[in-house]
Amino acid sequence: MNQCYGCNTCKSADKPLEGFIRELPMETSHHRVEGQSTKCNFGLQGVCCRLCSNGPCRITPSAPRGICGASADTIVTRNFLRAVSSGSGCYIHVVENTALNLKNTAKIKGELKGLKALENLAQMFGIEEMDVYCKAEKVADAVLADLYKPEYEKMELVEKVAYAPRVKRWKELGVMPGGAKSEVFKGVVKCSTNLNSDPADMLVDCLRLGISTGIYGLTLTNLLNDVLLGEPQLRTAPVGLRVIDPDYINIMITGHQHTIFVDLQERLIKPEVIEKAKAVGAKGFRLVGCTCVGQDLQLRGSHYTEVFDGHAGNNYTSEAILATGAIDAVLSEFNCTLPGIEPICDELRIKQICLDDVAKKANAELMQFEFNKREEQSEEIIEKIIAAYQERRGQVPLNLFPEHGNNNTLTGVSEGSLKEFLGGSWKPLIDLIVAGEIKGIAGVVGCSSLTAGGHDVLTVELTKELIAKDIIVLTAGCSSGGIENCGLMTPEAAKFAGPKLRAVCEKLGIPPVLNFGPCLAIGRLEIVATEIAAELGVDLPQLPLVLSAAQWLEEQALADGCFGLALGLPLHLGLPPFVTGSKTAVKILTEDMKQLTGGHVIINANGKESADILEKIIMEKRFALQI
Amino acid sequence: MKHVIIGASAAGITAAKTIREIDAKAEIVMISTDAWVHSRCMLHKYLSYERDEMGLSFISEDFFDQYNIQWKKETKVTRIDAVGQKVELGDESNVAYDRLLIATGAASVIPPVGEFRTAGNVFGLRNLSDAQQIRSMAEKAQRILIVGSGLVGMDAAYAFLENGKEVTVAEMADRILPLQLDEKAGKAYQRLFEQAGCRFMLGKKATGTVSDASGNISKVILDDNTEIECDLVIVAAGVRPEVSCTEGSGIKADRFIEVDETMQTNYPYVYAAGDVTGISGIWPNAMKQGQVAAQNMCDIPTVYDDRYAMKNTMNFYGLLTLSLGRGVIEENDKVLISEDSKNYRRAILRNGKLDSILLQGTIDYSGIYQYLIKNEIDLEGKQEGIFNLSFKDFYGVKENGEYQFQIENAAFA
Amino acid sequence: MKRIVIDAKKCDGCKNCTVACMQAHRADEGTVYDLDLTDVANESRNRILVDSDGTYKPIFCRHCEQPECAMSCMSGALQKDPLSGLVLYQEEKCGSCFMCVMNCPYGVLKPDTKTRSKVIKCDFCQDAGGEPSCVKACPREAIYVEEGLG
């Protein structure tokens, strides 16, 4: 008998990682997939309702309505609205904190690394101010003011940030959102017991929440982050478990709120702090990237080369990262921070500190981030982590995997850095698309999940099929983490692309899959799409652009999905979002939506079939544009 | 060992199959007057052209080959020599036996009303040969009179109505299906049949007939002097066991062949099963009797104990009914009725036990009631919820996984 | 022969078995995602009853040694297969008389709701490789297949 916990782990697109996890002596999420493989069939369809004490009710042929009279349509759309509200709330929490951190930094005249981004925002918002700090504060205030508006006051920045033809359509549909937090509030109230039972009304609310999520939680958050943390710059970086260097005190970060780490990032490379590390036998401190905040760090890595090791992996790689034994502490401030890391951290004596109680882990110490106390908090965190390092290193065995990942993944791609790379305009890209050298653009975004074939299985398979069809793929989210660890974001990956795309990539020295960073960067993709559409003089639904959240995982992904639909894009999902029990919901999402926003949902769990469907859509759009 | 079985319907076929399953080497010979093995419960489907001769079979096409049984069809047994252990056939040849099973079923009773017994257009509906003659004659007949509104009569009525015939049903009782249904349940079917064009003469008896030149009955006269013009008459007024082959053999048979609980007659090695024994003349019981007889014929002593016969299901025009028990209310009986737009249910409880139950509408999962009635299960405390009873109320599981009824602390198999 | 053994104590009434059975026997193509749960033509061969004490009693066809249903069938539609021991139903032969419904002592059978012309009878998922879908769907392993039972 060996010491491995169990052999029945789920598949992963990342074969080396799959093997590594299979041999671990501790249980991970990958081990638990099999035991949970029997799914509740009612839950899969979304026709289980637990909103009142008469339940749980399920829909069956002999009981086609819940006790209150709710039909399958009502139950499904209530559940869906609840999920989208929750998901939207998550993003709005992130943008609220981000804007507050910018505001507070501006007030004390702290460092603003992204002045170009600030100028860009100020212009968009119509703020004229000479002093950068006043400008920054006003920008942050404008965002916050919108977030805090009541439901009956429409948010003002939507019109300034979003693409004009889209805004026009949204106004026609009556889906311009009120205050972001109020919209979430309303969504949660609306789907509670015996309130709304109009499926169409609830799905329209989901569109509204999607717009609010997309403009504020996605697009603006990226730009606000850029102001504080610096704009992304193209560079090649190592990725995977190889980035973990045991000679350093390693801190794994999880979450979405990069601005919480501003002070800590700077502090960790200060000489006096490095000395503290050396005093206990380490060369210094390093931050190991995981989840979206890790992607954000990777994105802006050019500004943080001293403190940032690299992005080790996505959410479902986090357990493997910890299992290397070389992580000394976990700092969490949002998702995905798996509950499953608790027993692993316990066993490996990894210190857990939680910086935002929304992501509190049972055995983590809560140090709720307070801007005014950030310096003391950073100091305290450093002390605690040093203590953890001393206690655990040498006691806990290392299980490194230096062969995992690769050394030359292209990162730092943003709407700004990519445009700059192309010479300051999108024309070269547009020309390539018009000429057919690039057939179209696919955004493969969102999460990593363990079903839909396994860990990143559908995501990677779909990506390979798409680039083989000369469709360039842009990624944002944990999908990025999985794809980059599989080597598809290195220049060598051009060999997996179709002949035309391969030629383009080799000529430009870029991979056929471009990593825009965290899921927040779906907002960056929206900017790219908007700018290209504006140049062509068309609306977004007319672009040869498709979106896939192939292995969408959580409720935020559903809110993102609603944004994609509001933008009028075809949205592919691997597994249905628990809506198939309602014929009305399926019809609205997959058919009627085309007349509403121009977008629609496609559900398909097969990578090849999905790529075929998406390619067909791109060809239809090309045909309509006569290119 | 040579087994001879007279009759190839429910009892005979089941017996033959059972013998073969017990003894791979025995010789089995079946002798029957039928040209085809057919289910007598489905003859109305033949009348309505829904099924043909082959479609009436309840055995697989290669049954006789598969089970290695010799079948002498369209053959009548005229005499049985119970001492010499042989049977004599119509062509005067003999078939010897070691074991004999008489499963000749029953024949229609044609009452001596007018020319019923001699006319060329009066038939019982018991065998495929009846159905074949009826169907052929029905091609030219338009007006059909059915005497007797029991299950056979109503099945026939349904078949003819489906074929667009004018059907009249005469019944002595004041309601249709009088043995199985009460007035309310009967009326529900009556209405459906009437909507389909059927005419009912209830509380009336046929007393005379008028024939035409060719010897066919053209009119039937009822006891209230109503005259019913008809081209074809189906008499569905009951059956009597077909015991004619036992004449002169010494086998005790009066109105039916007498058997003990092992299905043996007064002669050793001679058995009887099915309708010919007069015990519970319905298909499932005939099958069971055939099985028990066969086991005893193979020297495996078993008894036939499931004699419960008052049980019927019917299915006309989408309305289903299940009826168990005599349905007669006696003094001190508890009668429970449940009625809504979809169901009519009536239960008669006597001394805490279920005596009869009638379910019209939905008959889902109703199999437990037969068990409760047959085995006289005490339903004290459960009576009010009689219509909601299900096996969960008696849930027991045997070691091999089969169910068994758990009554209080005792278990029934 | 093999039989689905029931451990009623483990049943928690989730009815996954019921939906799995409907899915296995649906007339149209599709996955459990699009199984129409409001169509009465989708019927399960098993059912889970709630007892008065709140516990659950699974009612599944036992494919009995002495099957009362087959012993009452006048059309030959219900027969006990000598090799597998399963009591199988041939819909084409059925005469819709429902004597089997009347005779099953455990009340397992019913006419189909939609047309009332056939019987809803467990076939041990013969067309699905002989591995019952209900057993695969039970998250508690309250039902499982055991071989060699008499």
Image (cartoon, coloured by chain):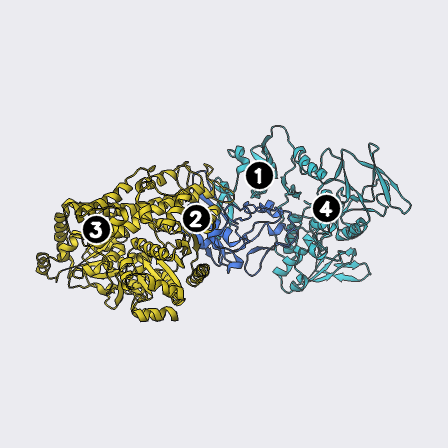
Chain colours: A yellow, B cyan, C blue
Query: In the rendered structure, the residue with mark 3 lies on which chain?
Result: A
Q: Nearer the viewer, mark 2 or mark 1?
A: 2
Q: Nearer the viewer, mark 2 or mark 4?
A: 2
Are callouts 2 and 4 both on one chain? no
**Where does the image place residue A217, in percent across and percent down from the top left?**
30, 48
**Where does the image place residue B323, in percent across and percent down from the top left?**
63, 39
Mark 3 closeness class: few <14, some 14–19, many ≥20 residues within 10 Å: many
Marks 4 and 3 close (CB-CB < 8 Å): no
Q: Secondary structure at mark 3?
A: helix
Residue for badge 4: B162
The dot on residue A579 is 2
Are callouts 4 and 1 both on one chain? yes
Q: CA distance from mark 4 to mark 1?
A: 41 Å
Query: In the rendered structure, the residue with mark 4 lies on which chain?
Result: B
Residue A477 shown left or right of residue C5 in the figure: left
Mark 4 closeness class: few <14, some 14–19, many ≥20 residues within 10 Å: some
- Residue A11 shows in this picture: no
- Residue A241 shows in this picture: yes
Task: Give the answer, above or below, for where A113 lies relative to A170.
Answer: below
Mark 1 closeness class: few <14, some 14–19, many ≥20 residues within 10 Å: some
The dot on residue A259 is 3
Q: Which residue reaches farthest top?
A: B331
Residue B346 shown left or right of residue A533 in the figure: right
Task: Give the answer, above or below, for where A438 lies relative to A128.
Answer: below
Task: Give the answer, above or below, for where A476 lies relative to C10.
Answer: below
Q: CA distance from mark 3 to mark 2?
A: 36 Å
**Where does the image place residue B220, in percent across and percent down from the top left?**
84, 39
Residue for badge 1: B376
Instruction: Give the mark, 4 or 1, whose residue is nearer the N terminus.
Output: 4
